[in-house]
Image: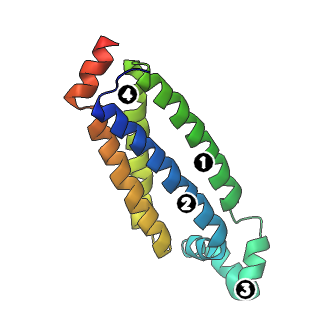
Amino acid sequence: MRDLPGSITHALRNLLALVVVSAAAVLLTWLQHDEIIRSWAKGNSSAQEILTSGGLAALRESAIVPKFVPLAIVSFVVFLVLVVVLGAFLVDGHGWSRLVLTGTSIFGLLVSFIGLTHGLPPAFVIVSALFFVLCLSLVLLLWRKDTSTYLRVH
């Protein structure tokens, strides 16, 4: 195995932490499904009508409610595969992987910002804050001088 600079090693650990936090978000989506539906319904007048007339059970069964749990699972699997593939290319010294990981991190910053600002349950605010910090630190690690040197040499 190659002798990796500290920034690459830390970036890989950071990617692992992002996967763990993402898995926690999926678990929370399943455990707090009703809270997510209530939070989502606040901004939807049709959902509010169903909630008022039939309660949470009626809203839960309604076709207008997004399938939050399956969406979270599919998103997690796609993210996991992306991280594994891009992490492998980063270790192998492909500079383009840094660009794609940076773009992915910027997207993660935007998604986590939405999670911080849209009235989600408190556990999701914590997960969003962790994800935000991890994405930001990943970008910083990817653009350190020792990362650039490693990618230039390999």
Q: Quick one: label 1, few (<14), some, or many (20+) residues within 10 Å?
A: some
Question: What amino acid is at disc 2?
Answer: Ala
Q: Residue at x 77, y 70 (%)?
A: 62
**Mark with earlier residue (4, 1):** 1
Question: What amino acid is at disc 1?
Answer: Phe
CA gap, disc 3 and disc 1: 30 Å
Q: Is residue 143 above or below residue 62?
A: above
Q: Are marks 3 and 1 in contact (CB under 8 Å)?
A: no
From the image, which quarter does the N terminus lie in?
A: top left
Tell me the SS state at disc 4: helix
CA gap, disc 4 and disc 1: 20 Å
Q: Which residue is mark 4?
A: 98
Q: Which residue is mark 1?
A: 76
Q: Position of residue 80 (x, y in %)?
A: 57, 41
Q: Position of residue 116 (x, y in %)?
A: 40, 64
Q: Which residue is mark 2?
A: 25
Tell me the SS state at disc 2: helix
Tell me the SS state at disc 3: helix
Q: Residue at x 66, y 52 (%)?
A: 73
**The one of 64 and 103 positioned closer to us in this rendering:** 103
Q: Are marks 3 and 4 in contact (CB under 8 Å)?
A: no
Question: What amino acid is at disc 4?
Answer: Arg
